[in-house]
Image (spheres, rainbow, N blue to C red):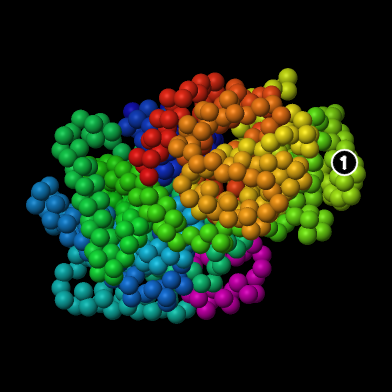
Amino acid sequence: MQPLITNPTWIFLVMLLVILLAPILFRRLRIPHIIGLILAGALLGEHGLGVLARDTSFELFGQVGIYYIMFLAGLEMDMGSFRRHGAKGAVFGLFTFAIPFFLGFFAARYLLQLSVPSSLLVSCILASHTLVTYPVIGRYGLSKQPSVTYAIIATAIASFAALLMLAIVVQKEHGGRDGWYWLRFGVGIVLYIVAVAYSFPKIGRWFLRRNEDAVTQYIFVLTMVFISAVLAATVGLEGLLGAFIAGLVLNRIIPHGGPLMSRIEFVGNALFVPWFLIGVGMIIDWQILVSDAHTLMFCGLMLAVATFGKWLAALLMQRVYGLQRADRFLMFGLTNSHAAGALAIVIIGTQPGVELMNVEVLNATVVLILFSCIISSFATEKGARQMALRTTELDRNRGSYHGKCLTAYAYPRMVDVLTQLSIMIRNPRIPDSLMGLAVSMDDDPDDLLRAQGVSNLEKAREIAAAADVNMSVMSRISSNVASAIVHTMREVDAGEIIMGMHETEDGKLSGKLGVTAQSVLNTSHREVLLVHLQMPLGTVRRIIVAVPPKAEYEVGFYKWLEHLCRIAEQTGQPIIFHTQGDTGYYIKEYLTTQHPSVQHGVQAENGFGNLIMRLPKEVNEDHLLIIVTARAGFISYTPALNTLPHFIAQHFSHTNVILLYPDQYGDPQESLSVFAPNGQSVTQRQLLFEEWLGKLRN
């Protein structure tokens, strides 16, 4: 079929649109972006809508992309872990490679009747894995846990072993078969690994010390990757194994989180890797997958064997070393997801000249990647939550007490109350701890918004000065308000951000978080307070606080508790906490020891959904309602928090309300948007059902 688009400019435009929009769409559907790009390629390819042809550009960019994937896999390994837990990690690496490998070979050879070389390659696909769900570990602050380290070491071992087995199988089928050939092959591999491991770090340090230009450094690193790939191909290995080894040996001289690492990841993730993934999707023939029962059986068998093999490896590791149940879930979740390695092996196995696997295996591999990533995300989340509850030291959950209290002003009528709130919760022991920010869009032709922002800041500074508090102010122009707020937070080291709740043009609550607030939450881990106040804080009669279960396990627990105590002390009003489980005990203990003068009460509740539905009857117009919530994916998150913006707009539009998001581990960029769609009604049945569903997931 003739492709609809052949013009190079149009092809590049379509690819950019796919790379831009596919991850956004599939992230909302809770599908890994890797799968999203592959599915987009399948939709646009010759076996889908026929929009694009898989021409030479996909071959070139695809080859670079697959090398880039393997290079990043090696580069992102935590090599320091090998020294601390190398022996146990190596044992788990042996388990998590060997068990799925032998189970996969038996299933492919005797159940699917594949040839021995094809069965070996299928086994390599099942034995390899990728740390797709590692960002979950960062959210829970568990990166230093031994079981996580075991999984990282096992990933390096399993990936290397699978790629080495791939090279051996390909050489056996298309290379020499005599003993001298295999001797030369083995000696060549050893010499190659020794040469790269010894020379690359020395050359890299020498070059990077003498060249500080960003572009030059990046081109040098990419050159080293392809030199390693060429040398690997020369001794009979696959080039992608050479790229993986280059990532491992250059790991120590390219600091994680440094500017060079950021540039490497940016270019790869923005262009080469997505181009490769879309090209993979174009190969998939969905008609075979849907219409052929044998292919469906192939998919199911691969998924079952891979999942069981990785689970058995984690179980065996747990029993051998006496680990906990949470450790097993973590190790299984981290090692069960198949992505980069599986794609690399199946692409090599199906390419012309090798052809040890067919399109059926490619289709099955894509299905394996999709479902293994989904299973891994649930397992890792479950294990991380259990371990966080087990290992968290509550006395350390005091969040960030340093930094400024940043207030972002958008609505003129909110300037007074927001400034009062910021004065109350700021840390009085930090000089110049108060800062005001106004952001105007750069497409404001008459500078009306900028002028309004400057006026808001001047008014805020006058209010602060009247309280004998110095407030520094900043007016910024940007094309993205949320980005300007987050950059300012990092620039001034702000510990918390205060913002007004999203309102409509007529000054009413919109029932949504708003794009700005949602973006700030997604790109910052600091405490965020979304405020809707109808009267000055000094005139409220009571403070009512709704606290979700397990809130004491969040890193910012004592920090927001301290902020609320400051509000209660300065207003002189009683504060009532509605809690569940042991949360009330820790709140009582803190107030008794740190703020004994605060009049307080703690009421135990049975279900957060029940509490939320009862609040409209208990909260009066002269009360201050504070709802402690959480970003999706963290310990105290509960589905009953999903529809809070709409619920507040419906029942508390004339009440004083603060939505408080505590400090939490890491930047929650991997968290998913789970708020209710526009106009969705909130019923008691819906909230209770969501809470019940959350309990099932936990």
Residue 266 in the image, given as x and y percentages of width and height: 55, 52
81 and 611: which one is in front?
611
**Which residues lie in the magenta part?**
200-228
In this rendering, would 31 be left or right of 223?
Answer: left
Residue 122 in the image, given as x and y percentages of width and height: 22, 53
In this rendering, would 210 be left or right of 134?
Answer: right
**Residue drawn 20% across and 51% down?**
305
State whether residue 287 appears in this view.
yes
**Residue drawn 53% across and 59% down?**
394
Local packing at callout 1 (Cα closer than 10 Å; few below 14, some 14-19, many 20+) is: many
434 and 127: which one is in front?
434
In this rendering, would 12 be left or right of 230?
Answer: right
Q: Secondary structure at mark 1?
A: helix
In this rendering, would 98 be left or right of 9?
Answer: left
**Residue drawn 49% across and 38% down?**
605
Residue underneath mark 1: 463
State whether residue 117 appears in this view.
no
Check the image and report above or below for 516 versus 333: above
* Helix, strand or loop: magenta stretch: helix
103 and 574: which one is in front?
574
**Residue drawn 16% across and 34% down?**
293
Which of the 4 image quarters holds residue 316? bottom left
Q: Quadrant of the C terminus?
A: top left
Q: Is residue 77 magenta?
A: no
Residue 330 in the image, given as x and y percentages of width and height: 36, 57
Q: Is residue 221 magenta?
A: yes
Check the image and report above or below for 243 versus 181: above
Residue 214 in the image, given as x and y percentages of width and height: 64, 62
Amino acid type, label 1: Ile
Check the image and report above or below for 621 versus 17: above
Q: Quadrant of the N terminus?
A: top left
Which of the 4 image quarters holds residue 319? bottom left
